[in-house]
Image (cartoon, helix red, strand yellow):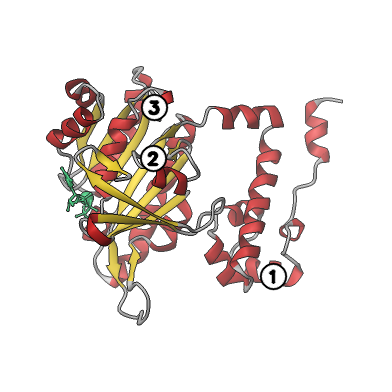
C-alpha cells in the first residue's frame, strides 16, 4: 500500500470526536463559526467556554485533544517528535517566571505576550531576554542572536550593556548580537517582519524576536469605533505572519502589549489587554504583569491551553529580571 492510500483511509476527525463535545455543543460552536478542529484548536479555553456554555476545564481538554489530533493528522509521530525536539527555550532570568512558563522560560515556535500597565516590566523583560538568548544552552540561553523591533524608542543600549555586564557577559558583544529596528508606524512594523527572513537567510542565528510594543501603533492609528474591525483585521494578519515566522525558523517570539481601562468592569482588575480575542488567539503564552509589594513585579499566566493559570513574583534589578 502506498503512503497516499494510507492517508486517504483516515477520516477527518469531527468536533464531536473531542472529549466533552456532544452534538448540542458542536452545533453551538458551528453557529459561532467554529466548524472544524483547526478553528477550535486555536481558540482560548475561556472563549470556548463562553461560546459553548461549558466549563473552562472541559474547554481546555477539548482544545488539547484537538491540537493532539491535528498534530497526528499532519505529520507522522517521528517527525512530530523531531519538531518538538528542536524547540528551544530562553530563560527569563527569574526561576519563578521560568516555572510559570512551564519550567524553562519562553519557548520557540510560540508567541509569548506580556501585557500590563506603564512600568510593569514588559520592556525590561524583553531586554533581559535579548541578552539571555545569547547565553549557552546550559545557562538558559540558545547561543543565538535577537531581533528587537522597537515601536516606542524604548530600546536602551546602555541598559542592555548594564544587564550583560551584571550577568558576566561581554557588553559590547552582547549589544552587537541584537539587531534593532525602530518601527515608525504599523505599515513599517509589518514591513520589518519581512526583513527578518532576509537576516536569517543571510546566516544570522536569530533565535528570538521581540516586538515592543506589538499594539501601540495599531492602537494609535485606528482610533474611532468604526475603525476597530479594520484594526483587528490588520493585526490578525500581522499575527499570523508572526506565527508563521516563529514556526518556519524555530524562533521564540516575545511581544508586549498595553492595557486599557475597562469602565464597564466594577469588580476585580479593571484593565484588559489591547487587541482582544485576535491577540488572545495568537499568543501561546500570555502573561499579565503588574507592580507588587516592595518593588516586586507580579506575573500571572492567563488562559494557557497547556499550563495552569498561576501567579508568581519577580524583580527588576541592575542585572535585569531576577528572583530577588
Ligand atoms: P511601558 O512601556 O511604559 O508600558 O512600561 P513597561 O512595562 O515596558 O515598563 P518597563 O519594563 O520599562 O519598566 C520600567 C521599570 O523598570 C522602572 O520603573 C524601574 O522600576 C525598572 N527599571 C528600569 N531600569 C532599571 C534599572 O536599571 N535598574 C533597576 N533596578 N530597575 C530598573
Ligand atoms: Mg515598555
Tally of marks = 3
Q: Which residue is mark 3?
A: 139
Q: Establish whether ligand 1 lies closer than 8 Å to the Cβ of label 1.
A: no
From the top left corner, tell me how far across and down residue 15 is, in percent: 71, 59
Residue sitting at x 35%, y 30%: 133
Q: Mark 2 = which residue?
A: 253
Residue 289, numbered circle: none
Q: Is residue 136 above or below residue 229?
A: above
C-alpha separation, residue under disc 3 versus residue under disc 1? 47 Å
In percent of width and height, residue 76 lies at 70, 31
Q: Secondary structure at mark 1?
A: helix
The reply to whether residue 221 is visible in this rendering is no
Q: Answer yes or no: is residue 321 visible.
A: yes
According to the picture, the residue beneath numbered tag 1 turns out to be 25
> Residue 146 location in percent, x, y?
31, 30
Q: Residues within 10 Å of mark 1 (few under 14, many from 20)?
A: some
Question: Dot 3 lies on which element?
Answer: helix
Q: Residue, x 32% and y 31% (percent of image)? A: 132
Amino acid at each position: 500500500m502506498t503512503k497516499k492510500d494510507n492517508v486517504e483511509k483516515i477520516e477527518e476527525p469531527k468536533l464531536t470526536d473531542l472529549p466533552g463535545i456532544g452534538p448540542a455543543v458542536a452545533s453551538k460552536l458551528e453557529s459561532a463559526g467554529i466548524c472544524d478542529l483547526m478553528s477550535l484548536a486555536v481558540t482560548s479555553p475561556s472563549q470556548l467556554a463562553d461560546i459553548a456554555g461549558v466549563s473552562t476545564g472541559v474547554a481546555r481538554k477539548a482544545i488539547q485533544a484537538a491540537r493532539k489530533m491535528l498534530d497526528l493528522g499532519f505529520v507522522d509521530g517521528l517527525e512530530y517528535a523531531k519538531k518538538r525536539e528542536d524547540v528551544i527555550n530562553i530563560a527569563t532570568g527569574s526561576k519563578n517566571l521560568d516555572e510559570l512558563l512551564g519550567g524553562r522560560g519562553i519557548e520557540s515556535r510560540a508567541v509569548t505576550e506580556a501585557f500590563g500597565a506603564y512600568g510593569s516590566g514588559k520592556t525590561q523583560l524583553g531586554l533581559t531576554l535579548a541578552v539571555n538568548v545569547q547565553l549557552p544552552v546550559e545557562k538558559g540561553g540558545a547561543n543565538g542572536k535577537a531581533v528587537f523591533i522597537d515601536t516606542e524608542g524604548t530600546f536602551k543600549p546602555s541598559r542592555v550593556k548594564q544587564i550583560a555586564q551584571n550577568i558576566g557577559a561581554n557588553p559590547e558583544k552582547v549589544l552587537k548580537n541584537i539587531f534593532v529596528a525602530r518601527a515608525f508606524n504599523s505599515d513599517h512594523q509589518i514591513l520589518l517582519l519581512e526583513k527578518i527572513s532576509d537576516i536569517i537567510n543571510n546566516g544570522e542565528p536569530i533565535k528570538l524576536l521581540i516586538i515592543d510594543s506589538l499594539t501601540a501603533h495599531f492602537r494609535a492609528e485606528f482610533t474611532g469605533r468604526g475603525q476597530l474591525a479594520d484594526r483587528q483585521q490588520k493585526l490578525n494578519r500581522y499575527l499570523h505572519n508572526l506565527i508563521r515566522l516563529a514556526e518556519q525558523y524555530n524562533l521564540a517570539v516575545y511581544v508586549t502589549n498595553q492595557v486599557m481601562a475597562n469602565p464597564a468592569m466594577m469588580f476585580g482588575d479593571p484593565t484588559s489587554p489591547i487587541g482582544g480575542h485576535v491577540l488572545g488567539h495568537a499568543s501561546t503564552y500570555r502573561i499579565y504583569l503588574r507592580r507588587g509589594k516592595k518593588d516586586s513585579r507580579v506575573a500571572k499566566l492567563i488562559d494557557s491551553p497547556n499550563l495552569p493559570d498561576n501567579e508568581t513574583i519577580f524583580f527588576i534589578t541592575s542585572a535585569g529580571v531576577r528572583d530577588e
